[in-house]
Image: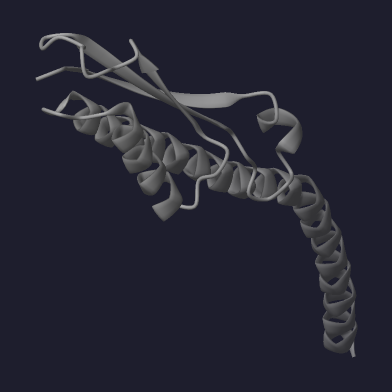
Amino acid sequence: MIGEQHVKTRLRHSSGRRSSRLGAATVELAICLPIIILVVFGSIESANAIFLKTTLTQASYEAARTVTSTGGTMAAARARGEEVLASRNVSGATITFTPNVTANTPTGTLVTVEVSSPATSLSGIFDWFTRLSNIKASTSMVRT
């Protein structure tokens, strides 16, 4: 008889501990889940920004290589840069050449090509942060 009461008392206490632990787990989830979601989406947006920066760098390099080569023109260089951007689905980018290259531009002139694009948010969550920023990349080469 005494043993039965001990078992019943023990079961009663363990079920109370389970429900209090369940409540603690719910509170922990309510606190941690928004932070985890923010970290995940922040990582995705950072990867998107890195991808965009890499694409702009490659487009500026290709455009600079084209415009500084023998017989290279700004039109051909702009087309090459836009081709690189289009192959990676980047829209709204601008390509700027400094100085303007013509047929009379002497050999040895340092030409800088800058490509810039507005930063965009993949998820839409960070639009308030990215709508005011532009990402830029530039490459300088000597005209041959």
The answer to which of 27 and 14 lies nearer the viewer is 27
Side (left or right) of 140 relative to 54: left
How many numbered marks are there?
Answer: 0
Toward which corner of the image does residue 69 lie, by quadrant? top left
- Pick whichever, 23 or 97, lies toward us: 97
- Taking 30 as reference, is 72 left or right? left
- Residue 58 visible somewhere in the drawing: no
Q: Is residue 125 above or below residue 117?
A: below
Quadrant of the rendering where the N terminus is positioned: bottom right
Horizontal arrangement in the rendering, residue 2 relative to residue 66 (left or right):
right
Look at 60% across and 49% down and name the residue there: 40
On screen, 97 above or below 6?
Answer: above
Residue 17 image position (x, y, % from top left): 83, 64
Q: Residue 76, located in which quarter of the rendered image? A: top left
Quadrant the C terminus occupies: top left
- Residue 21: x and y in percent read 79, 61
Q: Nearer the viewer, residue 44 or 27?
A: 44
Residue 105 location, x and y as percent? Answer: 21, 11
Q: Is residue 13 above or below residue 49?
A: below
The residue at the far front in this view is 104
Quadrant in which residue 102 is drawn: top left
Q: Position of residue 130 (x, y in %)?
A: 66, 31
Q: Is residue 77 visible?
A: yes
Residue, x 15% and y 29% (percent of image)?
Answer: 71
Q: Residue at x 46, y 24 (%)?
A: 136
